[in-house]
Image: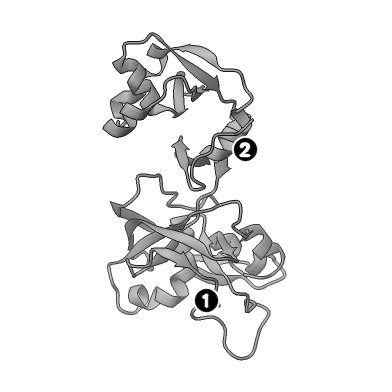
Amino acid sequence: MTIYQEEESSTFTHSGKLYSLNKLFEQTHTRKPTILDLSKVEWILKDSYVDPVRLEKADIEIPILVIHDQTLKLWVVLDGTHRVAKATKLKLKNIPAIIVTEEMLKQALIIQYYHLSFNNKLEGNWYPKIPDGSDIGEKTSLSEPDTLRISFSETIEGCFRAIYPNVSQYFEEKKYPCMEFYVYSPIITNKTKIVTSSQLTQNHLVHDAHVTKEIWILNTVKVELISKIKVLNTSEEGDLFYYPFHDKHFDKRYHSPKEIKIEIMKRYKNEELPLYNKW
């Protein structure tokens, strides 16, 4: 049986998390559809944009994907909003649906990654390289390897902490009240080669990856501009100290301001942004 697939980058959000549609299709294509009372899912149309062209093309014989949200006590449509809209327009009472389990949803979860830049014209393919500002000359126990990579973080706070040594002068010396950055995010596929923050820490590759939540992507990746943010100057509100590699055999060191305050100025993509680290 052929499994229906969207584009590799096709995703959806649920409860502020990003998921892969194709990973969900792979898990649900053999499940038997059920007949769902249309009134149980029509509520989603109140806050959803319905594209007229997609509405016209929607095939209501293809089951929608739904999950029962235990917190909301509602059926949530993960895929098939336009089919729900068409069934409503046709005044149908029921719609075919495949019920997704929490475990299936978990398997489809994508961790999103982020990168900050002053430049807003960097969309497109990014290529691995040795980062600007890397150690030059004699290596120390905290020096990073000369691995070609593209660095991202799991949070916006992590991104800012990672680049703080390079931009700290604007807060600490020039006393800027804030700095503005553009936020980029890579389109992750099954071909993306990722080194996680845990691996960077455990293998002593990046001494502060447990603080910055830094990850490496080792191959070419397409990157999208998703938002513009403002980071407020909190350099005089306390300091954050850490143990390199999360190892207490090292001396504790200053890292960055204790608290990072971030404001979203503009969204280019309609998605949730994980602003802060979970300590």
Q: Which residue appears at 61% of the width and 35% of the height? A: 26
Q: Is 56 rendered above or below residue 229?
A: above
> Which labelled disc corresponds to residue 143?
none
Residue depicted at 29% across the width and 33% down the height? 53
Q: Percent position (x, y) of residue 151?
A: 53, 66
Q: Nearer the viewer, residue 98 or 267?
A: 98
Q: Quadrant of residue 200?
A: bottom right
Q: Residues within 10 Å of mark 2 (few under 14, many from 20)?
A: few
Q: Nearer the viewer, residue 73 or 8?
A: 8
Secondary structure under the numbered disc 1 in the rendered image: loop
Q: Secondary structure at mark 2?
A: helix
In the rendered image, the residue lying farthest to the top is 93
* Rendered position, 82 above or below 114: above
Say if 25 sits above or below 209 in the image: above
Residue 44 shows up from this direction:
yes
Q: Residues within 10 Å of mark 1 (few under 14, many from 20)?
A: few
Report if residue 51 is visible in the image: no
Amino acid on which disc 2 is placed: Gln
Q: How many marks?
A: 2
60 with respect to 119 (left or right): right
Quarter of the image with the N terminus in it: top right
Q: Which residue is mark 1?
A: 131
Give x and y (percent) for residue 106. Answer: 60, 36
Residue in the foreground of this view, choosing between 248 and 5: 5
Is 150 drawn above or below residue 12 in the view shown? below
User: Mark 1 is on which residue type?
Assistant: Pro
Residue matched to label 2: 107
Task: Confirm or deny contact between disc 2 and disc 1 (CB under 8 A).
Answer: no
The residue located at (72%, 70%) in the rendering is: 249
Q: Position of residue 85 (x, y in %)?
A: 33, 22
